Structure formats: structure tokens, C-alpha cells
Amino acid sequence: RSLALAVFCLFVCNICRSPIAEAVFRKLVTDQNISENWRVDSAATSGYEIGNPPDYRGQSCMKRHGIPMSHVARQRFE
């Protein structure tokens, strides 16, 4: 499918929950072989954490469950 027909899913929160939701959802759509139908992203509503990695507790949890997590905090809204 072209990206024009893809579904967008944006998780908006902080450096803990939002990156976890993004990582889990990304794994779900990848495991179902439907990742080409989705554009998954995570962003903050404030600029407080811009440039920071996900919270270490979230990273640890994802590692224990074998879920890849690569995220750097960025703001999508002003």
C-alpha cells in the first residue's frame, strides 16, 4: 500500500509511556505483517524532554520483553 492509504497512529505523552506505547504497537503491527499499513510515532506536547532518551525504566521493561525501542524525545505540538 502507498503511504497515502496508511493509517497514522501518534502516541503523545512523555519520555516513559509514549515511547513504550510506540514500541509495543510497532512490534504488534510488525508481527502481524501489516507494518506497511501504519505510520507509528511518539512525541511530546511540551519541550521539556526534547533530545532525551526514553526513561530507563521503560527501556528496561521493553528489553525484558524483547521489544526493540529506539526513540529520542521530540516535540510535535507547540
Image (tube, grey):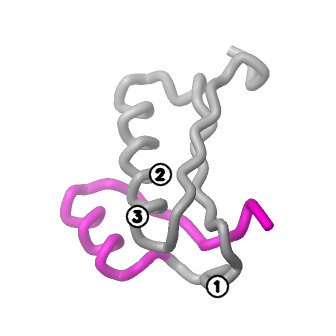
Residue linked to disc 3: 17
Q: Earlier in the sequence, mark 2 or mark 1?
A: 2
Tell me the quarter of the image containing the C terminus: bottom right
Q: Nearer the viewer, residue 46 or 58?
A: 46
Q: Residues within 10 Å of mark 1 (few under 14, many from 20)?
A: few
Q: What residue is rendered at 36% in x and 82% in y?
A: 56
- Place of residue 1 in the rendered image (x, y in percent of width and height, measured from the top left): 68, 14
Secondary structure mainly formed by the magenta segment:
loop
* Residue type for callout 3: Arg
* Residue type for callout 1: Tyr
**Above or below 53: residue 77:** above
Compared across the picture, whether 19 is left or right of 5 comes to: left
Q: CA distance from mark 2 to mark 1?
A: 19 Å
Give residue 22's mark.
Answer: 2
Residue linked to disc 1: 48
Q: CA distance from mark 3 to mark 1?
A: 15 Å
Q: Residues within 10 Å of mark 2 (few under 14, many from 20)?
A: many
Q: Earlier in the sequence, mark 3 or mark 2?
A: 3
* Quadrant housing residue 66: bottom left
Q: What residue is rendered at 24% in x and 67% in y?
A: 61
Provide the residue span drawn in magenta: 54-78
Q: Is 46 inside the magenta-drawn segment?
A: no
Q: Secondary structure at mark 3?
A: helix
Q: Earlier in the sequence, mark 3 or mark 1?
A: 3
Compared across the picture, whether 74 is left or right of 64 comes to: right
Q: Is 75 inside the magenta-drawn segment?
A: yes
